[in-house]
Every structure is written in C-alpha cells, then in structure tokens.
Amino acid sequence: MTSDTSDKRKPYYVNTVTNESQWEYPQHPVISTNKVRCLHLLVKHNESRRPSSWKQQNITRSKDEALDLIKSKFITTFYTQN
C-alpha cells in the first residue's frame, strides 16, 4: 500500500507482479510470502538537507555510516533458481 501524491491520506494498492494500481482494496489479495518490499528508504546523515528528525535533534552520522547502516540492516539479496 502506498499513498497518492495529491492526497497523502488516501491509499492506493499496487500489484507488484503486474504493476497495476487501483484505489479499491483488491478483491483477491496476494497470498502472504512473509516478505516486505520497500520502495523508498531514508537514513539521515550529517550532510542531509535537514540533519534532524523527531527522534534525534541533531544527526551526527556521516554519509558513509548511513550507507553502511543501510547495507548491514536493510539490504538483503534474494537468489532465485533458474
């Protein structure tokens, strides 16, 4: 589920297999695979446009530390058999 850019409160649904999107809840939801797909990930660093957040007044993490955090915690490589 993701939000429309014109109204952040109205969800729309995307079928990641067909890339079709719709406003209504799918009639036939996909069976759960216990996986989550992330389309956008933000890890702030001290060179960010606004290096602060609601959790942390002043972000001191370097750009390299932010990238290392993403690679170590959030990126998983999936292998498929041909």
Image (cartoon, rainbow, N blue to C red):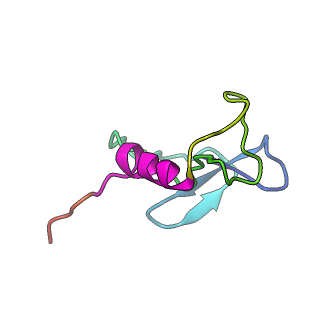
The total of numbered circles placed on residues is 0
Please tell me whether the stretch drawn in magenta is mainly helix, strand or loop: helix
Q: Position of residue 64 (x, y in %)?
A: 49, 55
- Residue that extends furthest to the left in the rendered view of this protein: 81
* Magenta-drawn stretch contains 74: yes
The residue located at (48%, 47%) in the rendering is 28
Q: Quadrant of residue 63?
A: bottom right
- Residue that extends furthest to the bottom in the rendered view of this protein: 82
Which range of residues does the magenta coloring cover?
63-77
Q: Position of residue 39 (x, y in %)?
A: 54, 56
The residue located at (67%, 48%) in the rendering is 24
| Closer to the camera in the image, 32 or 74 | 74
| Closer to the camera in the image, 72 or 61 | 61
| Closer to the camera in the image, 9 or 44 | 44
- Residue that extends furthest to the right in the rendered view of this protein: 6
Q: Position of residue 54 (x, y in %)?
A: 73, 29
The residue located at (60%, 49%) in the rendering is 42
The residue located at (62%, 48%) in the rendering is 45
Q: Quadrant of the C terminus?
A: bottom left
* Magenta-drawn stretch contains 32: no
